[in-house]
Image: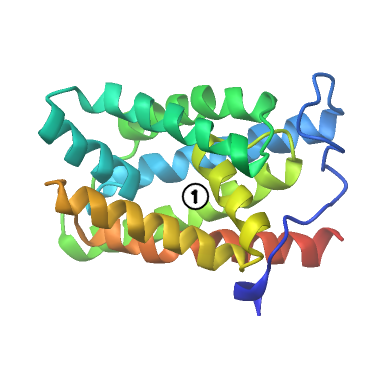
Amino acid sequence: MFLKIKKIPKVFWSSQKPLNLKPKFSSLFFLCLGLVIFGFGEGLLIVSSSGASPWSVLAQGISINVNLSIGLITFLISFTVLILWIPLKQKPGIGTILNAFIIAIMIDLCIKFVPTPEDYIHQIILGTVAVLTVGIGGGIYLIANLGAGPRDGLMVGLQKKTNLPIASVRAFLEISVVSIGWYLGGTIGPGTLIFAFGIGPAVALALYLIKKIFS
């Protein structure tokens, strides 16, 4: 049922438009809350040591072939994705900027305070929890409608153009990205595959539940 959801729901904390420099308190609060949860989930995936996210695998693969740092490649990928927003008519907002800062802070905090599981099974479990956490955070902050991060904005834009379910669009993006990254020499693990195949349904489930509870 939730896998068929096609639109970002509107609830009481949704902003009327993404480019809103004076959003209501609830929109800003849930935007930040969602990004904190999202960043925590990204950090958990790293801590799990079960495999990097698909976009990190892509950055690693490109880095191997062009002799640039993974950090610089990640920045260039984000910039390229933002350029792709133009034909998709996606609009940036406060969330686009806060996305980078809050998620980066949460990843660092998570790495500092959350220990890596010692056994393989618990690493996989933590990787799965990480994907669900990212999905929940993504759903909360996307519904705030104050501007998505580069990759989430690409997902939303492609969904509007194709009218396909959000889960399908996100899964297509992640699987395509990790396939290219792996082909270029990037390293993948079980957590990478869990993220690639699971993040679409996780975001869709979060959107569905939030709409069901708050609409």
- Choose between 51 and 67: the one closer to the eye: 67
In this orientation, does residue 95 appear?
Answer: yes
- The residue wearing badge 1 is 134
The residue at 75%/41% (across/down) is 144
Task: Answer few, some or many: residues within 10 Å of disc 1's Cα (few below 14, many 20 plus, some between 14 and 19).
Answer: many
Residue 124 image point, x, y percent: 27, 62
On the rendered structure, is 31 left or right of 87?
right
Compared to residue 64, the image places residue 192 above or below, namely below
On the rendered structure, is 146 left or right of 156?
right
Residue 104 image point, x, y percent: 43, 26
| Location of residue 214 by image quarter | bottom right
On the rendered structure, is 83 left or right of 10?
left
- Choose between 80 and 33: the one closer to the eye: 80
**Secondary structure category for the residue under label 1:** helix
Check the picture and name the quadrant holding the C terminus.
bottom right
Residue 94 image point, x, y percent: 68, 24
The residue at 74%/40% (across/down) is 145
The residue at 18%/41% (across/down) is 61
In this orientation, does residue 115 appear?
Answer: no
Give the image's coloring scheme: rainbow
| Location of residue 43 by image quarter | top left
Residue 71 image point, x, y percent: 28, 24
Compared to residue 203, the image places residue 102 above or below, namely above
Check the picture and name the quadrant holding the N terminus.
bottom right
Question: Please, what is the three-letter code of the amino acid marked with disc 1?
Answer: Val
The residue at 37%/32% (across/down) is 77
